[in-house]
Amino acid sequence: MSLIQVKNLSFTYAVSYTPVFINLDFAADTDWRLGLVGRNGRGKTTLLKLLLGELSGTGNILSSTRFDYFPYDVDENKSALCCMRS
């Protein structure tokens, strides 16, 4: 079991005046199964990029575990859409 702790995390893209996160705090146990859900453009991918170290904000991200990010290549031949009929 590891703990992911985010403390006082703030982030704003350089081309924007509106912050994505202001003083975000949360803790998550790596034994939990979690999902990020929300409308488009609300910061889900930005949070993952911050956790991965691809972006840097202010505040602290503390973790003793490695992060993986989902967007893997999809084999279109194995997609659920390949077998749909009109």
Image (cartoon, helix red, strand yellow):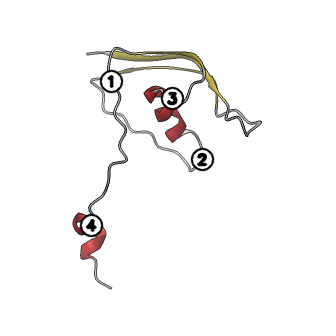
Quadrant of image for the C terminus: bottom left
Q: Secondary structure at mark 4?
A: helix
Label 3 – label 4 distance at C-alpha: 31 Å
Q: Is residue 45 left or right of residue 66?
A: right
- Which residue is under mark 1? 66
Which amino acid type corresponds to the residue marked 3 in the rendered image? Leu
Q: Is residue 38 left or right of residue 81?
A: right
Label 4 neighbour load within 10 Å: few <14, some 14-19, many 20+: few
Which amino acid type corresponds to the residue marked 4 in the rendered image? Ala
Label 2 neighbour load within 10 Å: few <14, some 14-19, many 20+: few
Image coordinates for residue 48, horizontal then vertical, percent: 46, 34
Q: Which mark is residue 50?
A: 3
- Which residue is under mark 4? 80
Residue found at x 26% / y 61%: 75
Indicate which disc, 4 or 2, sits on the residue closer to the N terminus. 2
Q: Nearer the viewer, mark 3 or mark 4?
A: 3
Label 1 neighbour load within 10 Å: few <14, some 14-19, many 20+: few
Label 1 – label 4 distance at C-alpha: 30 Å
Image coordinates for residue 12, horizontal then vertical, percent: 67, 31
Q: Secondary structure at mark 3?
A: helix
Indicate which disc, 1 or 4, sits on the residue closer to the N terminus. 1
Label 1 – label 2 distance at C-alpha: 25 Å
Indicate which disc, 1 or 3, sits on the residue closer to the N terminus. 3
Quadrant of image for the N terminus: top left
Indicate which disc, 2 or 3, sits on the residue closer to the N terminus. 2
Q: Nearer the viewer, residue 55 or 65?
A: 55
- Which residue is under mark 2? 41
Q: Secondary structure at mark 2?
A: loop
Is residue 67 depicted above or below 73 in this figure? above
